[in-house]
Each structure stands twice: as C-alpha cells, then as structure tokens.
Image (cartoon, grey):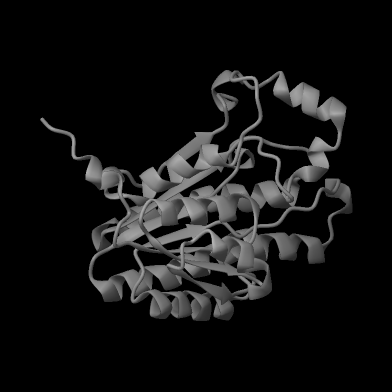
C-alpha cells in the first residue's frame, strides 16, 4: 500500500482559530496557514491580531470576538465562515487563567474563567458545526485542553474545572456529531511558557521541580504543538475522533 502524504495537507481547507493574538493560538494559526489552509483568527480586539495576520500570507481574516459571550461566538463564527467562503476547521484555543487559592475564589472569577474556557468553546463549536453542516462536508473541531484536564493542580481549580469540562465536552460532541461527519478532538499541552502561564515560570524553584518530572527534560516549544494540530485537522486523521492527545514531553506517561 502506498501512503498518500497529500492527506496531511490542508490545501483548500478553511479554518478559524480563536484566541490567536499570541502564544499557542498564534502558532497554530500560522502553522495551519503554512499547511495550506485559509485561516480566520479571532481575539477580543482585532488590533491584537496584526502580528498573526502577517504570518498568514494574506490568506485570512481577523475577527473581533469575546468568546465569553455566547451570541458573540455565533456571530464571530458566522463572520469567519462568510469571510472564508465556508468553514472546515475550528480550533477552540481562547482561554484564560488566574492563579488563586481555592478558598479565595469568588463567583466573579469562577464565571470569568468558565465562561471563557468552557462556555465559549461550546458555543463556538455549536456555531461551527452548523456552518459545517451547511457546507455539507463535515469538518474538524480541535479543543485546546490542558494537563489539568487529567490531573489536579493546586491554585488552579476554576481553570482545571473548565479544562476537565472541555475534555468531557470533546468526547460527548465527538459521539454526537460523528454522523454529521464532524470530528471533535483535543490537545493537552504540557508545560509551555506563554503569557498565560508565565507566572509559574517566574518561580525558579517551581520550574526546576517541574522540569525534573518531564522525561524529555525540557519545556515545550510552541512549534511542538503545530504538527499535532495539523494532523488532527487533516484528512490523515479522518478516522480519529474523541481523543485527548497530550503534547507534554512524556509527563503524563511518567506519573
């Protein structure tokens, strides 16, 4: 049997990446574009998307969208589909974290994190699934989970709750939407230093302790996530749905 490597290409595909102004979202958006996709990117303000747009080779669109607002999710996904002429791929990357001892978490903080990380991901996925149905060809939804989807992390209870919920949502939607030809998968980034997680890495003792737990003996680089995202978004993964793929240097395998 000859392997058809063209199935890894995203040529002709149309993708939306949320939370793409920097960090993981920016890297994945540019990676999808380099793999051949036309890519719409979103953030709360389009002003923060200029750097990302510069990496899309002129084949994309910038969408203002606050994913914590369900109506904004619907409108933003519709705008992306209109700009691209349809939608084949959604990467639910928008998220937030705030370190806080659980005894000090208040309702405002809880709602802000859960609305962004979980509610927003669902309503973006729902809107994307409707757009994919209209296209009559199915598609791929990729949710950005976390190691906290699988393990407990002190001072990250709202965040971990949102990411555990996102993993459950991934599996439920994969089962429900498979007959529609829509695959739903998730990535679980390990320890990557981004603006969202920088507070942890500022603690030298924490960094040293965590590095000792990673079999590959290094923290992740943003490029480490791009290949996995391209694979799960491509036809090469046509029989893959409902999975959680850790990209963690072997951390989960070793604990």
> Given the current orientation, which residue lies at the most extreme right position?
104
Q: Nearer the viewer, residue 250 or 119?
A: 250
Q: Is residue 61 left or right of residue 81?
A: right
> Given the current orientation, which residue lies at the most extreme left position?
1
The answer to whether residue 234 is above or below residue 59 is above
Whether residue 239 appears in this view of the structure is no
Which residue is found at the position 87% from the left and 49% from the top? 103
Question: Could you tell me which quadrant the N terminus lies in?
Answer: top left
The answer to whether residue 107 is above or below residue 100 is below
Q: Position of residue 55 (x, y in %)?
A: 53, 58
Whether residue 231 appears in this view of the structure is yes
Q: Nearer the viewer, residue 160 or 211?
A: 211
Q: Nearer the viewer, residue 179 or 200?
A: 200
Which residue is found at the position 78% from the left and 44% from the top? 198
Which residue is found at the position 19% from the left and 40% from the top? 4
Count of marks overlaid on the render: 0
Q: Position of residue 252 (x, y in %)?
A: 57, 27
Q: Nearer the viewer, residue 159 or 105?
A: 159
Question: Could you tell me which quadrant the C terminus lies in?
Answer: top right
Q: Position of residue 12 (x, y in %)?
A: 29, 62
Q: Is residue 180 left or right of residue 100?
A: left
The answer to whether residue 184 is above or below residue 192 is below
The quadrant in which residue 39 appears is bottom left
Q: Position of residue 80 (x, y in %)?
A: 45, 75
């Amino acid at each position: 049997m000859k392997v058809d490597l063209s199935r890894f290409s995203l040529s002709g595909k149309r993708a939306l990446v949320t939370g793409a102004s920097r960090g993981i979202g920016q890297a994945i958006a540019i990676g999808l574009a380099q793999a051949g996709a036309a890519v719409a990117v979103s953030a709360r303000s389009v002003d923060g998307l200029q750097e990302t747009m510069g990496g899309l080779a002129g084949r994309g669109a910038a969408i203002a969208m606050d994913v914590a607002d369900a109506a904004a999710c619907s409108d933003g996904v519709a705008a992306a589909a209109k700009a691209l002429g349809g939608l084949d791929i959604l990467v639910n990357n928008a998220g937030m974290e705030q370190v806080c001892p659980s005894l000090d978490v208040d309702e405002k903080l809880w709602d802000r994190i859960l609305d962004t990380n979980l509610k927003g991901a669902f309503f973006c996925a729902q809107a994307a699934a409707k757009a994919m149905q209209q296209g009559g060809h199915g598609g791929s939804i990729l949710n950005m989970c976390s190691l906290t989807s699988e393990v407990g992390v002190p001072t990250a209870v709202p965040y971990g709750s949102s990411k555990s919920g996102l993993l459950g949502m991934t599996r439920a939607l994969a089962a429900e939407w498979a007959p529609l030809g829509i695959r739903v998968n998730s990535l679980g980034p390990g320890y990557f230093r981004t603006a969202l997680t920088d507070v942890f890495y500022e603690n030298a003792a924490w960094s040293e302790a965590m590095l000792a737990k990673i079999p590959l003996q290094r923290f992740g680089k943003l490029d480490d996530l791009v290949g996995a995202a391209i694979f799960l978004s491509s036809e090469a993964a046509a029989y893959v749905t409902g999975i959680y793929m850790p990209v963690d240097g072997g951390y989960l395998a070793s604990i």
